Image (cartoon, rainbow, N blue to C red):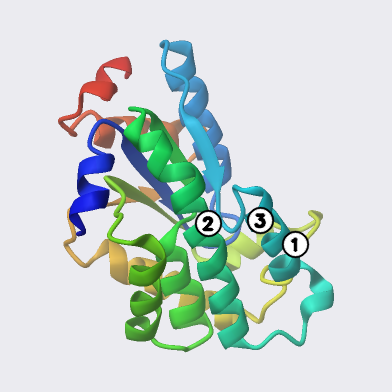
């Protein structure tokens, strides 16, 4: 991790949320934000792709069903462009200011979606992630695990985007990639049972956060 990033972010806390489509992670992010706000700490909510004016324009291109001809390499590069902008424009300044940052998807999403889903390979994606992140790493990453069949069922009746509409085999590879992260033993990963109710999912998150030694978590 680069010294510049390490020195500039210590007072803040970066919490990211990952999971396949329909896993409830966005609801979980909002639930945690409401919980923290009710206790006097207003977190900064961000999402990927997006989170900045530039990133939101990239997001529209990435998720637009009219972008059906987009190749896997273009998808990865656009994801990383949005991510690089988000880190430098929003995340690093917020962490330096001592804020809790909650991000709905982050770099692990590219490992799952472009590395596994698009079959570009984890090693390639991690190299691009390293460049985009500049040494930044989340303090904790919650993996909301839900089998793709159940995730697809939850999306019935909702407006879907280009990635939602990919074949089940694609979503199965994404799910397995997230499973692999959860089983990797890496300390920052915390697996959340996404078959549970939103309330129970939030309790799982709070229980894990209470194990972290960070002054900002006095608000839990």
Q: Position of residue 106 (x, y in %)?
A: 45, 57
Please report the residue visible at 59 percent of the width from the left and 47 percent of the height from the top: 51
Q: Dividing the picture into quarters, in which one does residue 121 lie? A: bottom left
User: Disc 1 designates what residue?
Assistant: 60
Q: CA distance from mark 1 to mark 2?
A: 15 Å
Q: Position of residue 21 (x, y in %)?
A: 59, 61
Question: Is mark 1 in CB contact (under 8 Å) with mark 2?
Answer: no
Q: Earlier in the sequence, mark 1 or mark 2?
A: 1
Q: Is residue 194 visible?
A: no
Which residue is nearer to you in this view: 88 or 35?
Answer: 88
Q: Position of residue 81 (x, y in %)?
A: 55, 67
Under circle 2, the secondary element is helix
User: Disc 3 designates what residue?
Assistant: 54
User: Quick check: 116 left or right of 51?
Assistant: left
Q: Is residue 100 visible?
A: yes
**Callout 3 environment at 10 Å: few (<14), some (14 to 19), or many (20+)?**
few
Question: Is mark 3 in CB contact (under 8 Å) with mark 2?
Answer: yes
Q: Dividing the picture into quarters, in which one does residue 208 lie? A: top left
Camera-nearest label, 1 or 3: 3
Q: Position of residue 39 (x, y in %)?
A: 41, 11
Task: Return the mark for residue 113.
Answer: none
User: Disc 2 designates what residue?
Assistant: 85
Of all residues, the one furthest to the right in this rendering is: 66
Under circle 3, the secondary element is helix
Please report the residue visible at 39 percent of the width from the left and 44 percent of the height from the top: 92
Under circle 1, the secondary element is helix
Q: CA distance from mark 3 to mark 2?
A: 7 Å
Camera-nearest label, 1 or 2: 2
Please report the residue visible at 31 percent of the width from the left and 33 percent of the height from the top: 12
Which residue is nearer to you in this view: 91 or 60?
Answer: 91
């Amino acid at each position: 991790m680069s010294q510049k990033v390490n020195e500039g972010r210590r007072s803040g806390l970066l919490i990211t949320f990952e999971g396949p489509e329909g896993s409830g992670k966005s609801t979980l992010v909002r639930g945690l934000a409401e919980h923290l706000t009710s206790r006097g700490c207003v977190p900064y909510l961000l999402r990927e792709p997006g989170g900045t004016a530039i990133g939101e324009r990239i997001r529209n291109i990435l998720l637009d069903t009219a972008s059906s001809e987009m190749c896997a390499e273009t998808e990865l590069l656009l994801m990383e462009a949005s991510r690089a902008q988000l880190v430098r424009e929003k995340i690093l300044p917020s962490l330096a200011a001592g804020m809790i940052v909650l991000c709905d998807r982050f770099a692990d999403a590219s490992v799952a979606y472009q590395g596994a889903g698009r079959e570009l390979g984890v090693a390639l994606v991690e190299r691009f992630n390293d460049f985009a992140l500049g040494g930044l790493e989340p303090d904790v990453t919650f993996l909301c695990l839900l089998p793709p069949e159940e995730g697809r069922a939850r999306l019935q009746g909702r407006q879907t985007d280009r990635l939602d509409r990919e074949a089940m085999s694609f979503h199965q590879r994404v799910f397995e990639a997230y499973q692999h992260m959860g089983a990797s033993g890496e300390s920052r990963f915390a697996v959340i049972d996404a078959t549970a109710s939103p309330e129970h999912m939030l309790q799982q998150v709070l229980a894990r956060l209470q194990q972290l030694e960070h002054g900002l978590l006095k608000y839990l």
